[in-house]
Image: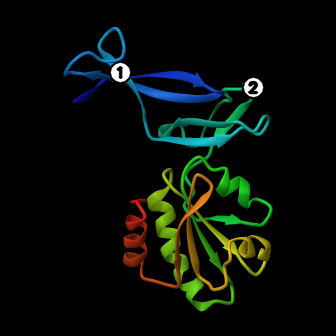
Amino acid sequence: MYFLAGGKSITICQGGVLRFFVIIEKRAGCGGRPDGSEAILLGAITSRCPACGTLNRAPADRMGKTGRCGMCRAEISFPVRPVTPVELTDANFDREVRAAGYPALVEFWSPSCGHCIGMAPVLDELARELAGRVKVAKLDVTANPKTASVFGVTGTPTFVLFRGGREAARFVGAMPRAELTRRLAGAGLL
């Protein structure tokens, strides 16, 4: 069993990425540090350095604040959690989804699709609920046909869950929020 030890934190640079840990106390047995405590990685947010491109991680309470890149020491900002899905294009898809350090749920949609328009509030809710754990994004297949064809999207709405830059699950068609949540849980996301 672990207990917070005064809320102290330490920063460790591993491979050019800042890692923030909270010192905890392990009451049963010896911990990983000489004083019997251990360091664990807490829920974190990430921000890519505009100067060198390194992905930097910070604790969630740093949202909306600035920091320094662990690689080049340039100033970076940790944006506030997005409350709406990220708008994707053919140009930014790889950077936003495939290179993301955490899972991404992408809706392939069309502005002329009534079911897609009806799913927008559901996706907005999921973006707020899953912020910091899953990137929720939308790709307009009419304006970005290249990416849609790469993934074989022939009907909208199509939801694709990416893990480690690869497709992990696919759900096709409009569905109530409860059904989408159930499917995401079945894919091991929730």
Residue 67, how many percent across, how many down?
A: 63, 31
Residue at image point 37% right, 76% down: 178
The part of the image, by quadrant, that contains residue 70 is top right
Mark 1 packing: few (<14 Cα in 10 Å), some, or many (20+)? many
Circle 1 SS class: strand
The part of the image, by quadrant, that contains residue 143 is bottom right
Asked whether 84 or 102 is in front, the reply is: 102
Circle 1 or circle 2, nearest the eye: 1
Residue 88, how many percent across, how many down?
A: 70, 65
Residue 46, how many percent across, how many down?
A: 59, 42
Residue 183, how many percent across, how many down?
A: 41, 72
Asked whether 176 or 33 is in front, the reply is: 33
Asked if residue 78 is positioned above or below residue 112 in the image, the reply reads above
Residue at image point 71% right, 26% down: 71
Asked if residue 163 is positioned above or below residue 152 in the image, the reply reads above
The residue indicated by pointer 1 is 38
Give the colour scheme shown.
rainbow
Q: Amino acid at mark 1?
A: Glu
The residue indicated by pointer 2 is 72
